[in-house]
Image (cartoon, rainbow, N blue to C red):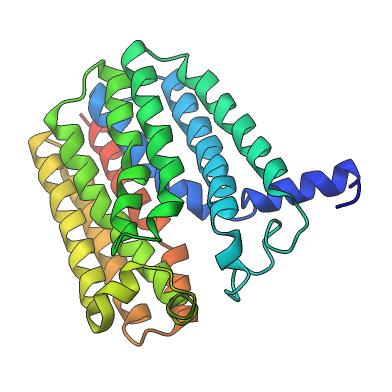
Amino acid sequence: MGAIALPQRLRLWLDLIRWNRPAGWLLLLWPSLAALWLAAGGFPGWRLVVVFTLGTILMRSAGCTVNDVADADFDRHVQRTAQRPITRGALSKREALAVGAGLALAAFALVLLTNALTIQMSFAALLIAVAYPYTKRWLALPQAYLGVAFSFGIPMAFAAAANDVPLLAWWLLLGNLFWVLAYDTEYAMVDRADDLRIGIRTSAITFGRYDVAAVMASYALYLAMWLAAGVQARLGWPFAAGVAAAAAMVGWHYALIRERDPARCFTAFRANHWVGFALFAGVVGSYALR
């Protein structure tokens, strides 16, 4: 691989971390911020908001580098991923890992602005995230494992805002896991034909003809569990309105995915961050009106 001019290299790095596709980090951000508000009993302060926002962006970006390194040999056989920088040979795996390590270190520097409990939990979060790409080799539902990785910002938010991780935090994590399972199954439905051919294991393949039903059941569990948490936290009508708005979006998702058309499944996946935003807005609105 020859020398690459700096502007071109920067473009490759931005492509590597999916900088032009913010839906990925928004899916992680909204539940983490909602957990911050719940843990603090209202606005948690700008320092924590900035730390968790920037940390989410950095860690999602670092995760993309690890995922692409791990999946390079698979991605070249999937139409949607064949032109990723590592897959097409524009970036080496070593350079990609160096970029990812730099992003992870920057995220850790932000965590150092919190407290000892949050710092300790950040190591577990890193290990869980790094292991995810390899679960597709042996887990029937790697999307469920991804649910843990993508939801770990919730207990970390409680640790940072309250210096405690109560049962409520783990309940919210479990509920959020079902949301991740729902939207990442939609994502897996896009690549099902390619994944079957190359031997990748996904929830879309495992659920088979019950995939749409599994997605809708996962959405229902997610909304029900977060609604129950909102009742326990005595959130008001804004949160109920947020849950209702999210449920309406889920109904639209059913219309998109029921025929299993890959393009429509991808549309559903990309729109999922609005579901999380609806619940976050409901949490913020409830505390603002107290």
Residue 252 visible in the displayed image? no
- Count of number-bearing discs: 0
Horizontal side of 10 relative to 17 (left or right) equals: right
Horizontal relation, residue 194 to residue 15: left or right: left
**Residue at 47%, 72% in the rendered image:** 266
- Farthest residue in the bottom direction? 259
Front residue of this view, candidates 64 and 154? 64
Residue 184: where, in percent of width, then height? 37, 62
Q: Residue at x 21, y 76 (%)?
A: 213
Q: 15 above or below 36?
A: below
Residue at the spot 59% in from the left edge and 64% down from the top edge: 73
- Toward which corner of the image does residue 52 lie, by quadrant? top left
Q: In the rendered image of this protein, does residue 155 appear above or below residue 263?
A: above
* Residue 146 in the figure: left or right of residue 49: left
Foreground: 189 or 76? 76
In this view of the protein, which residue sits in the foreground, 143 or 41?
143
Residue 10 in view: yes
Q: Is residue 14 left or right of residue 156?
A: right
Q: Residue at x 21, y 24 (%)?
A: 165
Q: Position of residue 67 (x, y in %)?
A: 53, 51
Instruction: Locate the C terminus by quadrant.
Output: top left
Q: Position of residue 131 (x, y in %)?
A: 42, 44
Residue 77 position, x and y percent, is: 59, 74
Q: Nearer the viewer, residue 199 or 91?
A: 199
